[in-house]
Structures are given as structure tokens and as C-alpha cells.
Image: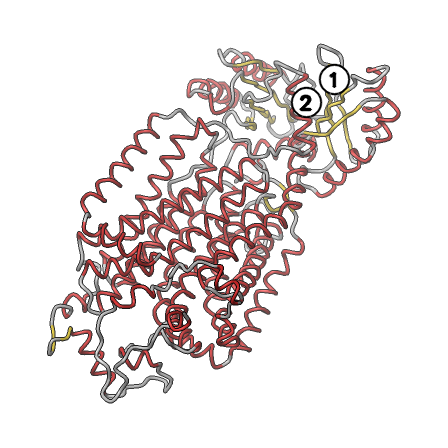
Amino acid sequence: MATFLYRMGRAAFGRRRLVVLLWAVLLGVAGAAAAKAPAAGDDGTSFMPGIEAQRAFDLIGERFPGSDADGASARVVFIAPGGEKVTAGEHRAAVDAFVADAGDGPRVAGAVSPFAADAVSEDASTAYATVTYKVGSADLTDADRSALEAAVDKARDSGLTVEVGGNALASQPAAGGAAEAVGIGLAAVVLLITFGSLAAAGLPLLTAVVGVGISICAILALGSALGLSMTTGTLASMLGLAVGIDYALFVVSRYREERERGHAAREAAGLAVGTAGSAVVFAGLTVVIALAGLSVVGVPMLTKMGLCAAGAVVVAVLVALTLVPALLAMWPEAVLSRTARRGGSRTTGGRTAVEHTAVEHTTTGERTTGERTTGERRTGAADNGGSRWARFVLRRPVAVLLACVAGLGVLALPAADLQLGMPGDEAKPVTTTERRAYDALADGFGPGFNGPLTIVADVRDAADPRAAVTAIASRIEGTDGVVSLSPPQFNGAGDTALFSAVPATAPNDERTKELVQTIRAERPGLEDETGAVFEVTGSTAMNIDVAQALQDALVPYLAVVVLLSLLLLMLVFRSVLVPVKAAFGFLLSVLASLGAVVAVFQWGWGAGLLGVEQTGPIMSLMPVFLVGIVFGLAMDYEVFLVSRMREAYVHGERPAQAVVGGFRHSARVVVAAAVIMIAVFSGFVGSGESMIKTIGFGLAVAVLFDAFVVRMALVPAVLALLGDRAWWLPRPLDRLLPRVDIEGTGLAGRSAPVQAPAGGDAQPQEPREAART
């Protein structure tokens, strides 16, 4: 692996113009395809095959053809000024005028007056009209929306307060914009601080933007054909930007390191891609496995999001392996530090300035903590914050391990109270008309009005269909928690009836879930009594069923992803305990992040600081989603950090020395990569879309816990306690697993020559892997 990537890096460096041109052409083609592609439609966020609510929804579409359940709709709410009634002369005339104007459009299927549909509250302060369209919301034209908005504005001019719910005028979440701009800005600051060079900071940003641009354009181009929405592309944008910056960061950092060791630019690029690029490949594979594994859950929208994001990660990996070395070839000195640019070309006695400095340090016997490794004495490597932190952990591994487990365990406690649901208009900011319409309907008609339950009764096998429907409706109407029931509506064939029940509680209230379960529990007796079969659907029942199905799918999904990733990490590190330790740390970090999400978005702790205006159940997709994404990202840092320890170990360092060496070379870059990823995800917390806000916060805190607590503290503590046992692999597995050489053993002969200290051992230590064979 390392040798192949080394050659790829050198080839990209040598053919830099061709590589850059190919990526530019690919970006242009994707952009042109996206510009010409038709707009993507709704991806059916709340629907999941196999659940009862979905079966009932499909039955309605089959038995009630022409009902146009997929058409766009608007529920327009009219609120009379204080103390007045919408039924008063002027207000009623304004509402009637609105219905006439709104129903006049060519794509409008119908506009129902509240006075004809009994849609006026008991105190007559609130009423609503329903406008339905012949096409879906994605197919509405600007003219259609403008006509509805003009009718609404005319009604407002009469003195009524008018708000609009439904999907006809609903704002759609965007996959780009301010969130990415904030993330890129913060990433630029971190990169500049890390590298101290504008070119070195700008190159990862440039390549990440190119990768994200290609990915998002491809999603837009294929959106209509594959049913990909802008929400689907949000995850690809978020992850593509984060890992794109991180992967390029690791390659550029290794390139600078190899240049400081005395390598020529092309050789340094090849070594950087051969070593850091190997870590990038396997880190990317773990992320792809986690994302592609979302397809086993069975939610189409989640599957699309996972596969699109996995594609964006693959693009980011290819960019890091080809475009990054090509751009390094165009500016080989610009990414180096100022000191390296000034002194890199000077030599002393046939050695580079870097080598000469190394000899001076080693021959004078300079020490930092009295625990310098053989590799340090041989190369003169200086201590830094990473190595000092590693030694701190190595001196007290048990205390650090217990502190990490206890701290993350306490943060995970709120996760025990996790309640799942799907955010609706009640979770939107009060600045949106959809949220104000939701609140007005809840005030005027009761909290359950926004989430009615739809009951569809199949009476084909009933002896008396109408009597059967009457019996079912009577039983449901008498159920505690049901405040009203609509009259049954039969289809043309008379074999199916449809009616709705309004609960006394809000859609996301736990008592509403209990009501749905109670109604379904009454079904066996009613079916035996009447011979009719009925099912419960509607948005509220759909969300309840989706949440339960996702909860049931969480454990199998977790098992599949963890098993595949453990096998991959076993292949990378040739160890049994290191992958197990990585999975244990991941579980701690993901549970702690779930606890933080519950504390903020469900309990309301600090919700105001994040702009969360409505707390409640956590999005039902969040646990599965967080497990998949965080596992991939956690393995990213595991591969980047531990691969350097593995590299030092197989080249002769003792276990403790390998940990210190790994932190010396990787800690600063891993910290920078984690801060960048946190910055990118945090940018999405400012989104007005509740789902995106929750995802951004959950991923940001998960990276915070995993990178700074698990990988930077728990990992070295566990490795210190395990010693050589950390790298143990049973002989049968050792023979069975192929050798991928992620630590660059095959490139050892290409290392820059370093003068041995006086009186020291001038012979390089034999790599452990080579000695073992």
C-alpha cells in the first residue's frame, strides 16, 4: 500500500499540470450538469417501508385514487384582532375573498372555505382554509407561490392576522451557504496558527472546496433522477468539507516534515502520500463503511444521505492523494515554514542545515525530561506539547483512564432519558409563518389538532361494511385522549373508509404515543367483531412508527458497522486489542454526545444560547445517524494518531517510546484537524432547520469528546497499561491477514540519512515486522 501510494504521489507531483487540469475539468463538468439538471423533489423524509403507518398510507393511495395525497398544500390560518370574531361581516368577507383568489390558480386543485368545512374555532377567534395543488411542492412555480402570497397579503390588509402552514410556501433547508462560510473561516484561522504559513493554510482549504464542489454538484445533477433533496446533500457538504480539510492537512503536514528531514520536494511528496496517504485511505474507508452502513437501517432518506456523504468522502480521499501533491509541486517551497524556507538550502559539511542541527543536539547530549528515546537521540527530535502530554499520561495511566471513563460516563447519563420523535413546524423559529400558524391552530383548536390520526378501514370482508365502520369509529371516539372524530368517508367502491381522530395532546407528547398504542391494541377485538381491518396513519403515527423502527434497528446497525470496522482496523494495525480499545472509546464518546444532545435539545439546558426555541423529543434519526457518522470520524483520529505509534514501534521503539513518538509527530496535527472539524460542524448549529442544527451540535460535541478525551488521553493511557500486548496478534490471524504496510516499512530505505551521535550505534534498528519474518 505505502509503495503504491508513494509512486502515486510522485506521479502526481511530476504531472502536476495534467492532474490539476483533470480536476478542474471534472469540477466544470459537474457544475454544468448541476446547472442544467431539473430541481430535486421531496425525498419523503418521514416515510419508511414496512411500518404500519406506511402500509396504511399506501392503502389510501391505492383505494382513493385521485385524492392527490402527494400534492402540495397550504393551511392558511386567520386570527381575528383581540376580542373580535372571524365570522364578523368584514372579516368573513376577507376570508371569502381569499378563498376565491387562492382557488383561481391553474395548478390549484381546490380551496376550501373554513365556513363550509366547519373549520372555525369554538370562540370564533380563529379559522383556517385549506388550499391544495395538483402538483408537489417541488413542482410549484414562482408564479404559483406568488399568487398565494398575494392573496395572503390582501387578507392581511383587511386587519386579520394571517399565517401559512403546510408545504406550499415552506422554506427548504439549504446544503450550502453561511454554515460552510463560517466553518471555512474558522478552519482558515486554525490552519494559519498550526502552519504559520498562508500557503500551507490555504492549500487544504482550496482542495477541500474543490472536493465539496464536485460532490455537491454531482448530487444536484443526480437529484431529480435519484430523488436526492437539498437535505440529503447537507450531510455530504458537512462531512466532505470537514474530512477534505483534515485529509489534505495530514498530507501537507507530512510533506513539511519530510522536507525538514532533508528530502527533495518530489521525494517528500511521494513519502507524504505513501505514509500519511495510507492513513488517509484507511481512515476514509472507516468513514465510508459507517456511512454506507446506514442503508441497513431501512430508511430511504437515511440511506441516500449516507451514500451521498460516502461519495463525498471518497472524493476527498482522491483529492488528498492526487490534487494535493500536484499543488505542492507548483509551490514546493511556499508551504514550508519561514525558518525552513530560509535555512533549508544551506549545508554544513555536506549535510543540510536540518541534519547539522540534529547532530549538534545529539552530540551535546541535550535532554528534556531525562526520558529521550533512541530515535530522539539519533535524530535530535525536540520535545513539543504532544510529547510532553504523552509523558504526563504515561506517568499516571490509571488515573487518566479512570478520569476519562468517569467524565464521559457522567455526560452520558442524560441519554437514558432519550425520547425520540420527528421535528415539525413546532420546532421552527417563531420568525417563520409555519411556526406561527402551528401555534395559532394549537391555541384555537387544541394541541392535538396539528397532529390528527388518520384511520383507514378495509371492509371488503365485512358482512355489513357501513355497520363495521360505525362500530370502529364509535370505539375509537370513546377512547380516552380522543377529543373529536370526523365522519367516515367511503371510496367509490365502498370497500374502504377513511376518517381522522384528533388527540387531546400535541403530536410529540408521550401521551399521544400511548393513545396510538391503545387504539391499535383494540384492533383484534374489533376485527373479530366486525370482520373489518383498520390501520392508523398520519404524520403523528408515522413519526411514532419510524422512531420505534429506528430504535429496533440501532443494535443490528451498530453490530454491523463495528464488526466491519474492527476487521479493517485489525488489518491496519495487526492487533486485536487496539481495535477493541478504539471501539470502546467510540462507545464512550457517542453516548456522551447523545447525553449532551438530550440535555440541550430535550431538557433545554443552554438551549437559548444555541437558538433552540422549542425543546422536545430528539429527532428519531439522530441516534442511528450519530452512531454512524461519529464512528467513522472516531476511527479517523484513531488511524492518524495510532498509525504513527505503530510506525515507531515496528521501527524498533519500545511501546512507551512509540506512544511518545506518535504524539510528538501527530498530536498537533490531530488537534488542529479536530478543531477544524468542530468548527465546520458548529457552523451548522446556526441553521434555522431543527434537524440540521441538532446534527451539527451532536457531531461537534462528539468530535470534541472523541478527539480530546478519548484519543488524546484514554488511548495513550490504555496503550501504556498494555505495553507490548497492545500489538499482539494470534499467529493464525497474522498469517491470514494481508500486509498493507500502512506504517511505510517498505519505504524505510528512502529515509533521509541522519548522522549518528558520537560513540552511538550507527546502524539503524531493524524494523520489528521485518525481524519477525
What number is the disc on residue 315? none
Q: Where in the figure is residue 312, as x and y percent of width and height?
A: 40, 43
Mark 1 = which residue? 496
Q: Where in the figure is residue 56, as x and y percent of width and height?
A: 69, 26
What residue appears at the point 56 percent right and 27 percent down from the top-left corner? 166
- Residue placed farthest to the right in the image? 529
Task: Give neighbour class at mark 2: few <14, some 14-19, many 20+ (Cα, 10 Å).
Answer: some
Q: Secondary structure at mark 2?
A: helix
Left or right side of 579 for 667: left
Identify which residue, 150 or 679, lies in the foreground.
Answer: 679
State how far apart marks 1 and 2 are (Cα): 9 Å
Left or right side of 414 for 487: right
Type of residue at label 1?
Thr
Question: Would you place residue 624 above or below residue 402 in this image?
Answer: above
Type of residue at label 2?
Leu
Q: Where in the figure is residue 239, as x and y percent of width and height?
A: 42, 47
Question: Would you place residue 368 above or below residue 282 in this image?
Answer: below
What residue appears at the point 47 percent right and 59 percent down from the top-left corner? 737
Identify which residue, 109 or 8, lies in the foreground.
Answer: 8
Placement of the C terminus among the 4 image quadrants: bottom left
- Which comes sooner in the sequence, label 1 or label 2? 2
The answer to whether marks 1 and 2 mark residues whose Cβ atoms lie closer than 8 Å is yes
Identify which residue, 228 or 295, lies in the foreground.
Answer: 295
What number is the disc on residue 59? 2
Task: Give neighbour class at mark 1: few <14, some 14-19, many 20+ (Cα, 10 Å).
Answer: many
Left or right side of 574 for 459: right
Question: Would you place residue 752 above or below residue 106 in this image?
Answer: below
Placement of the N terminus among the 4 image quadrants: bottom left
Q: Where in the figure is residue 311, as x and y percent of width and height?
A: 41, 42
